[in-house]
Image (cartoon, rainbow, N blue to C red):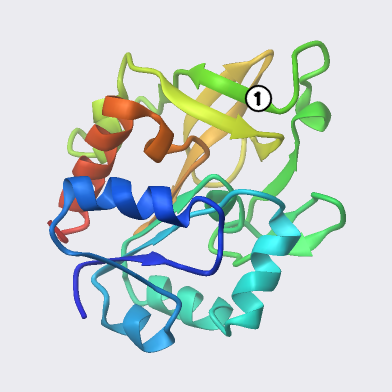
Amino acid sequence: MSGVLVLDYGSGNVESVFNAMRRVSDSVSRSSDVDDLARADAVVIPGVGAFPAFMASLERLNLVEPVRAAIAHGMPALGICVGMQAMGRLGMEHEPTPGLALTDGTVESLRSLGVLSRRVPHVGWNDIRLAEDLPSDSPLRVLEDRDVYFMHSFAYPADAPGAVGWTDYETEFCSVIQKGPAMGIQFHPEKSQRSGLDFLHAWVRSAGSS
């Protein structure tokens, strides 16, 4: 197997992410098999729901260490929503839960981050302020001056390690992290229409898996 693997661990948005990826690449598969992960060129980690349930699913399928190892050895990875959150060291949803520790960030509730008067969860279209020193060839560049779709109650704080994108929702939170070959996005590209597809296409090209 080669190309992009959509990690199929039972998340509710695996199907929609897989379908979106198939619209931008001819080399996409979906699997929860460790051997398939090892043979992939890049991996997409979808996610909806609660952080503890996400980590429990990965542990049940014995995927935690293989995912860490694949990224540590240079495999490009894209974490989406809870898939992004789980890239951090710790999630505070329901109870403190260790994540994949690909970055040192801690995921907190939007309320604790300062969203006090606006609705939580944050659902709907919003933009992303990108880091000024973002490389010109970053796939995130296609999102400049465009809105994408969010649906979440937890996020990284604005000063999270590896933050390269921020979104304002009464307070500013980190909406994109990057560390080495791993990128995490809080928004849902599969729900973001043309903006989302353009981003996924750019990410696939940057990952060398088109």
Residue 63 percent location from the top left of the image:
53, 79
Q: Which residue is mark 1?
A: 122
Closer-to-camera residue (174/66): 66
Q: Name the residue rendered at 62%, 28% in the picture.
A: 173
Q: Is residue 102 left or right of residue 43?
A: right
Which residue type carries mark 1? His
Look at the picture and state if 153 lies above or below 44.
above
The quadrant holding residue 81 is top right
Look at the picture and state if 50 lies above or below 132.
below
Does any portion of residue 65 appear in the rendered image? yes
Q: Name the residue rendered at 40%, 18% in the picture.
A: 147
Residue 79 percent location from the top left of the image:
46, 53
Residue 45 percent location from the top left of the image:
46, 59
Q: Is residue 163 left or right of residue 171?
A: left
Q: Is residue 116 left or right of residue 158?
A: right
Label 1's element?
Answer: strand
Count every numbered label the image shows and give the total: 1
Residue 198 percent location from the top left of the image:
23, 33
